[in-house]
Image: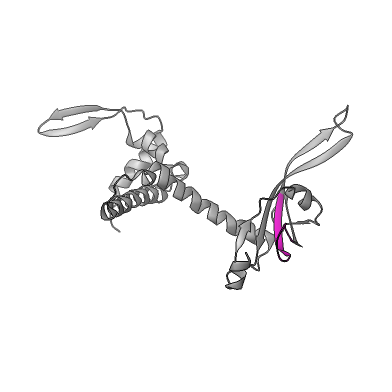
């Protein structure tokens, strides 16, 4: 982080530190406005070999209430989920938490593209060939994602690529031949009828 700061670069880094929960328990927490169950705090701290203290910000939410004692009511101890960051950005703890969450969403998309669209399995030793396959996979991924988004169907928007492929693309049916045409007859009752109908409607979207 010294190198980043010397170069004038800002950062927002999630903290993974031994004894972090104990450190956070000592802080003064305040409720997050309009977010019931959430609290936030900020403080300065210097880890191990750091040259100086840096700004830490954190949020927490109540996960459960732990009861101890013979009658399960003598000692009531709240148990929290903590989210802590070290940063140079002038963000409130809650703003930093939401900003970092956007990064987590991007990582989900990258994981889908890598593991569900074959980006992690390009075998060619030719750069141009690998580039073409990579771009084709990204184009296919974006096409499926956009189809799910414009379907305006909540479940389709939430499904991962492999789920769409398993339930909507790999559909069982009977291949019919006749009149020099090939047709696939599918069951009248689909396993996911609502999602199937929303997916089929995308084939009939016309220009406005």
Magenta residues, start to end? 46-60
Number of numbered callouts drawn: 0
**Which sits in the foreground, 41 or 65?**
41
**Which sits in the foreground, 180 or 58?**
58
Where residue 8 appears, as percent x and y from the top left, is 59, 73
Q: Quadrant of residue 3?
A: bottom right
Q: Inspect this view and state whether residue 36 appears.
A: no
Judge whether residue 20 is colored magenta.
Answer: no
Give the residue drawn at x 23%, y 31%: 184
Give the residue drawn at x 39%, y 34%: 193
Where residue 6 appears, as percent x and y from the top left, is 61, 72
Q: Farthest residue toward the front?
A: 49
**Which sits in the foreground, 186 or 104?**
104
Where residue 137 appears, as percent x and y from the top left, is 33, 49
The colour scheme applied to this rendered structure is one colour
| Residue 117 to residue 95: above or below | above
Where residue 100 appears, as percent x and y from the top left, is 59, 57
Q: Inspect this view and state whether residue 107 appears.
A: yes
Q: Farthest residue toward the left?
A: 180
**Which sits in the foreground, 42 or 70?**
42
Q: Quadrant of residue 102?
A: bottom right
| Residue 33 to residue 22: above or below | below
Quarter of the rendering occupied by the C terminus? bottom left
State left or right for residue 194 relative to residue 187. Answer: right
State left or right for residue 172 relative to residue 100. Answer: left
Give the residue drawn at x 32%, y 28%: 188
| Residue 65 to residue 1: above or below | above
Quarter of the rendering occupied by the N terminus? bottom right
């Amino acid at each position: 982080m010294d190198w980043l700061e010397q170069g004038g670069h800002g950062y927002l880094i999630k903290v993974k530190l031994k004894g972090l929960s104990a450190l956070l328990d000592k802080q003064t927490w305040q409720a997050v406005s309009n977010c019931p169950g959430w609290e936030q705090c900020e403080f300065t701290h210097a880890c191990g070999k750091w040259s100086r203290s840096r700004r830490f910000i954190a949020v927490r939410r109540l996960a459960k209430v732990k009861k101890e004692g013979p009658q399960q009511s003598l000692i009531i101890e709240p148990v929290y989920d903590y989210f802590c960051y070290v940063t140079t950005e002038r963000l409130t703890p809650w703003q930093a938490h939401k900003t970092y969450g956007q990064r987590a969403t991007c990582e989900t998309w990258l994981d889908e593209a890598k593991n569900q669209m074959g980006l992690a399995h390009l075998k060619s030793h030719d750069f141009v060939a690998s580039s073409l396959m990579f771009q084709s996979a990204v184009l296919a991924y974006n096409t499926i994602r956009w189809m799910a988004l414009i379907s305006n169907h909540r479940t389709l928007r939430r499904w991962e690529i492999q789920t769409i492929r398993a339930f909507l693309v790999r559909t069982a049916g009977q291949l019919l031949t006749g009149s020099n045409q090939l047709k696939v007859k599918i069951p009248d009752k689909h396993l996911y009828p609502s999602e199937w109908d929303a997916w089929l409607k995308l084939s009939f979207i016309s220009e406005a």
